[in-house]
Image (spheres, rainbow, N blue to C red):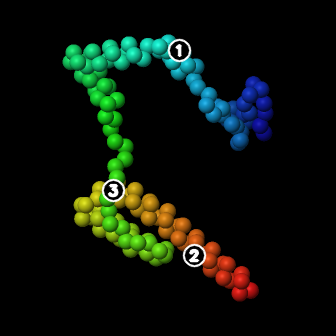
């Protein structure tokens, strides 16, 4: 049984949140974050200059920090890969086989293969749904 705890949240008898609890409102920020932002307001230029000066002076931590801002590590890279055309859900099996061959042949990493395979699978589902919709429409018209 859910009961009102403090007027803001709902918990059960064991103190667990009941289903449907909205949690923190969207856009709400932690008070520590707000306090830090207030302290740093207007100091960005000075702090940046100090970090650059430390980096230029040989501080490896400051150097790493500056370099990460100049050229952040790439989170995603384009994959160039010849993928067979997919016009039916069955064509996706050939595309999946091409991905597996590329991974096993070393021209694509397993992570790249998994990403491409997820795209193939999503497209296959779209094709399959479209095919089913056409079949259902044809059956309904014939009825």
Q: Which residue is labeled 1 in the image?
A: 38
Q: CA distance from mark 2 to mark 3?
A: 29 Å
Q: Secondary structure at mark 1?
A: helix
Quadrant (top left, top right, bottom left, bottom right) of the N terminus: top right
Q: Are marks 3 and 1 in contact (CB under 8 Å)?
A: no
Q: Which residue is labeled 2 in the image?
A: 131
Work out whether mark 2 precedes mark 3 in sequence or the reverse, and give the earlier one.
3
Residue 128 vertical position relative to residue 12 in the rendered view, above or below: below
Question: Which of the pair 104/142 is nearer the observer?
Answer: 142
What is the quadrant of residue 2 in the picture? top right
Q: Which mark is residue 94?
A: none
Q: CA distance from mark 1 to mark 2?
A: 57 Å
Q: Secondary structure at mark 3?
A: loop
- Residue 4, horizontal then vertical, whole percent: 78, 30
Residue 142 vertical position relative to residue 7 in the rendered view, above or below: below
Q: Is 114 positioned to the left or the right of 133 in the image? A: left
Binning the other alpha carbons within 10 Å of mark 1 as few (below 14), some (14 to 19) or many (20 upward) gives few
Q: Secondary structure at mark 2?
A: helix
Work out whether mark 3 precedes mark 1 in sequence or the reverse, and give the earlier one.
1
Work out whether mark 1 precedes mark 2 in sequence or the reverse, and give the earlier one.
1
Quadrant (top left, top right, bottom left, bottom right) of the C terminus: bottom right
Q: Which residue appears at 40% of the width and 56% of the height?
A: 115
Question: Which of the pair 116/45 is nearer the observer?
Answer: 45
Q: Which residue is labeled 3 in the image?
A: 79
């Amino acid at each position: 049984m859910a009961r009102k705890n403090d007027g803001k949240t709902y918990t059960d008898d064991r103190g667990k949140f009941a289903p449907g609890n909205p949690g923190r409102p969207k856009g709400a920020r932690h008070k520590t974050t707000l306090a830090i932002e207030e302290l740093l307001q207007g100091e960005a230029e000075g702090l940046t200059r100090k970090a650059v000066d430390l980096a230029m002076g040989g501080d490896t931590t400051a150097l790493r920090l500056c370099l990460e801002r100049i050229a952040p590590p790439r989170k995603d890279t384009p994959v160039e890969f010849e993928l067979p055309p997919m016009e039916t859900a069955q064509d996706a099996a050939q595309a999946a086989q091409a991905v597996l061959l590329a991974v096993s042949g070393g021209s694509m990493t397993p992570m790249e293969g998994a990403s491409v395979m997820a795209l193939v699978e999503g497209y296959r589902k779209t094709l399959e749904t479209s095919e089913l919709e056409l079949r259902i429409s044809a059956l309904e018209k014939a009825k």
